[in-house]
Image: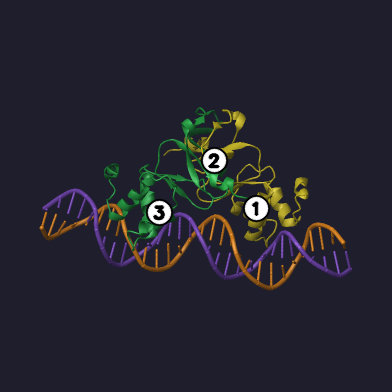
Chain colours: A yellow, B green, C orange, D purple
DNA sequence: TACTTAAATTATATCAAATATAATTTAACA
DNA sequence: TGTTAAATTATATTTGATATAATTTAAGTA
């Protein structure tokens, strides 16, 4: 949490609550999920505060915005290199670490593009959904 | 285009215009871009028709919905296996074919997930944007 | 060729996610 | 303790996407 101190951002109780919620969080929450969680502590909590804080953290490189979900943005406080798998039935997003994959950094050379990062989306069925009918 | 005939969908002039716009299209257009293009021919064209047709084509597996752009959905009529690179400055999306990459199908085994497909998003700078200042 | 009908189109309304505005409050620092 | 830039808040607005219901039409059938 004290890495937040070094960012130059103001340490408001609301932001600390958001940081606390995000710290170690593996659920890839949307803005609404963050809002709901933090609203429990701050009844006056505003959506704008969530978006402001997300924006500030994004600029500082402390969270990543995920585009894996077509319905809404999701956020990931784990900024180490990893990938994601989303269940095509329930939408749950889980992490895929690079050492779970027998895969080298793809040696890609693409005309006219300077590659800076890459991310794999896996799609499939989680155990719960695979068990279910239909 | 005649593969469309086999889908059982009604061949309306509006749909044919959308199909014609999408055929061979490598620009990964959004619904709005499709709407704008087709509106030139059909002044009464409705957004709902674009979304209806997109939905019908998605169900038939004739286009893919891309989640690479955080602002909106984009659509890709190229349903062969390939990946994408998006310019972090201008947002342009280009194709990355698998034989441009020295990469095997990742041998991934993920606890509790049955993997059905995967897609790589590359992020970087296109030539035009790399040249520019800032 | 005309008739019938399910499907598609359209204008419009609505929804949901995200962002903008402006007044008020507050953390951080002198 | 006072000052101020930054953050919070309620609210309004924007944007992308979807839903509704009346109208039109493609496509099969008589």
Q: Nearer the viewer, residue A44 or C29?
A: C29
Disc 2 with disc 1 on a shared chain: yes
Identify the residue position indicated by label 2 in the image.
Answer: A113
Q: Could you tell me which secondary element the residue under label 1 belongs to?
A: helix
Q: How much space separates mark 3 and mark 1, taking CA atoms?
A: 32 Å
Identify the residue position indicated by label 1 in the image.
Answer: A54
Q: Nearer the viewer, residue D10 or B79?
A: B79
Residue C3 on image: x %, y %:
14, 59
Report if the CB atoms under discs 3 and 1 are less than 8 Å apart.
no
Chain letter of the residue beneath label 1 in the structure image = A
Q: Image check: B76 left or right of A24?
A: left
- Tell me if I can see residue A94 in this picture: no
Query: Looking at the image, which residue is at 66% across and 57% down?
Result: A52
Q: Which mark is residue B34?
A: 3
Query: Looking at the image, which residue is at 40% across and 39% down?
Result: B79
Residue A72 on image: x %, y %:
54, 51
Mark 2 and mark 1 lie on one chain; the one further toward the N terminus is: 1
Report if the CB atoms under discs 2 and 1 are less than 8 Å apart.
no
């Amino acid at each position: 949490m004290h890495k937040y101190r070094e960012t130059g951002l103001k340490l408001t109780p609301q932001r600390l609550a958001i940081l606390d919620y995000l710290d170690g969080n593996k659920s890839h929450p949307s803005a609404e999920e963050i809002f709901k969680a933090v609203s429990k502590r701050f009844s006056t909590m505003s959506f704008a505060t969530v978006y402001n804080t997300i924006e500030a953290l994004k600029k500082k490189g402390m969270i990543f915005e995920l585009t894996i979900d077509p319905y809404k943005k999701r956020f990931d406080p784990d900024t180490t290199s990893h990938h994601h798998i989303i269940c095509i039935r329930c939408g749950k997003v889980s992490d895929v670490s690079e050492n779970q994959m027998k895969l080298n950094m793809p040696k890609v050379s693409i005309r006219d593009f300077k590659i800076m990062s890459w991310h794999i989306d896996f799609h499939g069925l989680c155990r719960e959904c695979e068990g279910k009918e239909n």
